[in-house]
Image (cartoon, helix red, strand yellow):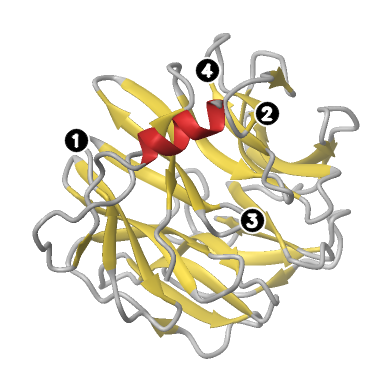
């Protein structure tokens, strides 16, 4: 019965429009999963749990909960800040960022918060880890090659094994962040901002070759995520203090606005079943997680 109530709520009010905006059409209304400051959501591989970041007990920590918002569990503790959780493909581990020596570094832990191990050791800012679909590599972005590592002018993408070895640089020059592997591991989505350009969504081969701009829009485009079938991409488009959630085909065509709400809607992530998207919304000095149904294509 609860599931039916959620579906009924999802069917009542969100606007879905084609870019440029068209008259509102019937679509799905996002449902808030919590009322504390929560952000950077990540689906578990089975789609039954979410990992996310919250300051509900003070400093930023990693938590998990069921996809319906119940079963809250805190995974990290201490005075330092932790963020950017990412599940391994088998669901047994979570990569995340921890600032425990004054520097953001990549760590991994078991899905219950135990066995926390630091992977990166270089000076610079190491953030936004994401696992390859086969679980053999972790992709992340780093300022380690920037001249000013504390206030970097560049962020580049790197990959490594899950034990922190065999580090390989993937991108060079400019700012490359918020990467996402394609379901087959052959391509990488990213938000890229050249030194003389705008922030757009790009796609490239997993080795960094064939870099292609998908959005070419005057607004700030970021936070891209593949659908599980690889056919669509969700991302956020930011204009000033507002940001909405958009969906497009994997080749950059067919862009449409999925969610428009007052405030900043960012960090969208497809569910493993490709029928829901979780995202965070900042408005009225609060940040909350929402889930919205995705119309079938």
* Mark 3 or 4: the one toward you: 3
Q: CA distance from mark 4 to mark 1?
A: 22 Å
Q: Is residue 213 above or below residue 223?
A: below
Q: CA distance from mark 2 to mark 3?
A: 16 Å
Apparent side of residue 247 relative to residue 46 in the rendered image (left or right): left
Q: Residues within 10 Å of mark 3 (few under 14, many from 20)?
A: some
Q: Is residue 250 above or below residue 143?
A: below
Q: CA distance from mark 1 to mark 3?
A: 27 Å
Image quarter where the C terminus lies is: bottom left
Query: Disc 1 vs disc 3: Cβ atoms closer than 8 Å?
Result: no
Q: Position of residue 243 (x, y in %)?
A: 25, 47
Query: Disc 2 vs disc 3: Cβ atoms closer than 8 Å?
Result: no
Q: Residue at x 66, y 25 (%)?
A: 63
Marker disc for residue 272: 3
For disc 1, the marked residue is 262
Q: CA distance from mark 2 to mark 4?
A: 13 Å
For disc 2, the marked residue is 64
Q: Residue at x 83, y 28 (%)?
A: 112
Q: Identify the secondary structure beneath mark 4.
A: loop
Q: Identify the secondary structure beneath mark 1.
A: loop
Q: Nearer the viewer, residue 127 or 54?
A: 54
Choose the circle earlier in sequence order: 2 or 4. Answer: 4
């Amino acid at each position: 019965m609860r599931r039916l109530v959620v579906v009924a709520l999802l069917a009542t009010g969100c606007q879905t429009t084609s870019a440029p905006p068209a008259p509102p059409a019937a679509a799905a209304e996002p449902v808030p999963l919590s009322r504390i400051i929560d952000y950077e959501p990540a689906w578990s591989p089975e789609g039954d749990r979410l990992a996310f970041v919250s300051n509900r007990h003070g400093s930023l920590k990693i938590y998990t909960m069921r996809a319906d918002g119940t079963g809250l569990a805190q995974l990290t503790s201490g005075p330092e800040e932790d963020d950017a959780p990412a599940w391994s493909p088998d669901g047994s581990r979570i990569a995340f960022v921890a600032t425990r020596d004054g520097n953001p570094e990549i760590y991994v832990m078991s899905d219950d918060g135990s066995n926390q191990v630091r992977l990166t050791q270089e000076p610079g800012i190491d953030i936004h880890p994401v696992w390859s679909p086969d679980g053999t590599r972790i992709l992340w972005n780093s300022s380690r090659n920037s001249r000013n590592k504390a206030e970097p002018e560049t962020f580049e993408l790197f990959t490594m094994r899950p034990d922190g070895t065999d580090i390989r640089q993937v991108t060079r020059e400019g700012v490359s962040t918020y990467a996402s592997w394609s379901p087959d591991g052959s391509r990488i989505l990213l938000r890229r901002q050249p030194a003389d350009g705008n922030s757009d969504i790009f796609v490239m081969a997993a080795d960094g070759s064939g870099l292609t701009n998908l959005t070419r829009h005057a607004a700030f485009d970021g936070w891209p995520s593949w659908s599980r079938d690889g056919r669509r991409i969700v991302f956020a488009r930011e204009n000033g203090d507002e940001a909405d959630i958009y969906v497009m085909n994997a080749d950059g065509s067919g862009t449409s606005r999925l969610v428009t709400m007052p405030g900043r809607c960012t960090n969208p992530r497809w569910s493993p079943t490709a029928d829901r998207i979780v995202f965070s919304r900042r408005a009225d000095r609060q940040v909350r997680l929402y889930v919205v149904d995705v119309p079938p294509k």
